Image: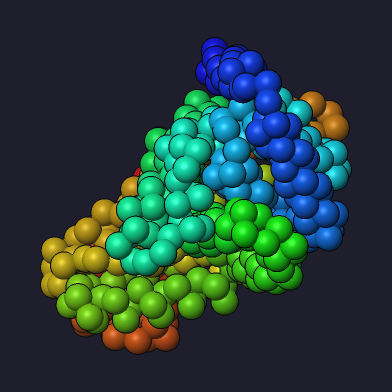
């Protein structure tokens, strides 16, 4: 990871310095530097207007965080030579560090690396567009002459996104151990739609700067509206997340479960509902305290998400109860067998947990945990979410009555289950 950091940062310094050294000592260079200062000033005004929103966004962001400064950095890539485009990024991101990242507690080394990735993305996009690419679009006289230049702009946008996100994904994969995957490392599709929208505004800002510089101020109002819209989405996501475990809340899980059942009906797949309850959890709170109990709940939540697929929603239903929806199962006995195997896998994983907890008297390990699981699957157990949850709840208490640490399926108490 250190090697990647230093390589990217040294490459950034070398390319910016080399780009600046290659500039001719004439009026065009002076105008480019003056324009870069103006673009950085607009980025500063934008950040100041949106500082409060951005601080909240950074605090509530999860794995990925997309700021909206690409409007100015991509505009710089379109307007200026590579070295000057790098200076625009450095100026905008230096102010972002001081006003947004530093107050939010972000690490300085992370910000330096992020700035370097954006500089490299801007240099790559600037190289693709070349000096006359944007000017061709601005002065195009008809569709025939405009289409090639528009294609070049779209290519520049793609290069900007790919270079930036590949470098960010590489860093996240090395530091978190997650696979180099679009969904897990690069963020959700909504994040990429947001990035695309800011790049489009960057194109409009650059075109305005070429034809009528004062019109570039009209970019600010829709940009601030976009800030608020994105903040609302992130706050909704946070509201749907259980604070202790990081799982879905009961209401959010129900919403996703209803959508999963609807997809199952469309695709003619079976869907299973699992309700899980930690056995004797009250004794954990009584013996070790509620903070230790929270650590146990968090460990169990991580185990649940690790034992099911990413497409299977997992929620905290209340207290020590959890719920899982397994989608895309075959109908009939094969689906029941797969649902039972998933429940068994979860039960065994929880049984093997050893949760290390720091206490005033020293660290201790909480083990001997177990979970009872009730399972219901579409078909003979019901079709609606309410029916499935009733049957799964009935099966859960059948597992409890049978001695806990068991899996029970469907309506029959006597149906074969499993235990450690």
Q: How far across and how far down the image is residue 283, in percent?
A: 67, 52
Instruction: Identify the residue at image location x=42%, y=86%.
Output: 386
Question: Of 395 and 171, which appears nearest the observer?
Answer: 171
Colouring of the image: rainbow
Residue drawn at 68 percent across, 26 percent down: 26
Residue in the image at 47% along x and 43% along y? 132
Q: Position of residue 48 (x, y in %)?
A: 85, 54
Front residue (pair 34, 366) = 34
The picture quadrant where one finds residue 87 is top right
Residue 31 at x, y percent in the picture: 71, 37
Residue 153 appears in the rendering: yes
Q: Is residue 105 visible?
A: no
From this view, report whether residue 363 is shown above or below residue 217: above
For the C terminus, the quadrant is: top left
Q: Is residue 94 left or right of residue 186?
A: right
Question: Percent from the top left, x then y, of residue 60?
Answer: 70, 55
Q: Is residue 322 left or right of residue 67?
A: left
């Amino acid at each position: 990871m250190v090697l990647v950091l230093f390589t990217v940062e040294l490459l950034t310094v070398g390319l910016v310095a080399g780009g600046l050294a290659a500039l001719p000592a004439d009026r065009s260079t002076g105008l480019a530097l003056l324009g870069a200062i103006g673009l950085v000033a607009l980025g500063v005004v934008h950040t100041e207007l949106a500082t409060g929103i951005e601080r909240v966004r950074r605090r509530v962001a999860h794995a990925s965080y997309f700021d909206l400064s690409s409007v100015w950095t991509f505009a710089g890539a379109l307007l200026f030579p590579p070295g000057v485009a790098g200076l625009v990024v450095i100026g905008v991101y230096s102010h972002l560090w001081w006003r947004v990242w530093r107050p939010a507690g972000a690490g300085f080394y992370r910000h330096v690396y992020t700035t370097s990735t954006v500089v490299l993305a801007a240099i790559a996009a600037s190289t693709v567009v070349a000096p006359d690419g944007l000017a061709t679009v601005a002065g195009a006289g008809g569709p025939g002459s405009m289409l090639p230049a528009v294609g070049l702009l779209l290519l520049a946008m793609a290069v900007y996104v790919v270079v930036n996100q590949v470098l960010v994904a590489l860093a996240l994969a090395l530091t978190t151990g997650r696979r180099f995957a679009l969904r897990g490392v690069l963020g959700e599709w909504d994040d990429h739609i947001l990035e695309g929208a800011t790049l489009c505004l960057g194109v409009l800002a650059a075109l305005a700067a070429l034809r009528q510089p004062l019109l570039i101020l009209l970019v600010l109002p829709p940009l601030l509206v976009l800030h608020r819209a994105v903040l609302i989405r992130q706050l909704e996501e946070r509201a749907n997340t259980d604070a202790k475990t990081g799982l879905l809340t009961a209401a959010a899980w129900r919403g996703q479960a209803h959508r999963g059942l609807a997809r199952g009906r469309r695709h003619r797949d079976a869907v299973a509902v699992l309700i899980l309850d930690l056995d004797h959890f009250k004794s954990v709170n009584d013996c070790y305290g509620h903070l230790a109990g929270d650590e146990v709940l968090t460990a169990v939540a991580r185990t649940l998400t690790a034992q099911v697929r990413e497409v299977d929603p997992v929620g905290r239903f209340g207290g020590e109860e959890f719920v899982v929806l397994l989608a895309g199962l075959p109908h009939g006995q094969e689906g029941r067998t797969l649902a039972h195997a998933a429940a068994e896998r979860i039960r065994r994983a929880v049984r093997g947990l050893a949760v290390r907890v720091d206490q005033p008297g020293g660290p201790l390990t909480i083990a001997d945990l177990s979970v009872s699981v009730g399972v219901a699957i579409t078909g003979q157990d019901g079709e609606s979410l309410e029916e499935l949850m009733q049957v799964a709840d009935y099966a859960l208490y059948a597992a409890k009555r049978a001695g806990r640490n068991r899996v029970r399926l469907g309506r029959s108490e006597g149906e074969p289950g499993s235990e450690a």
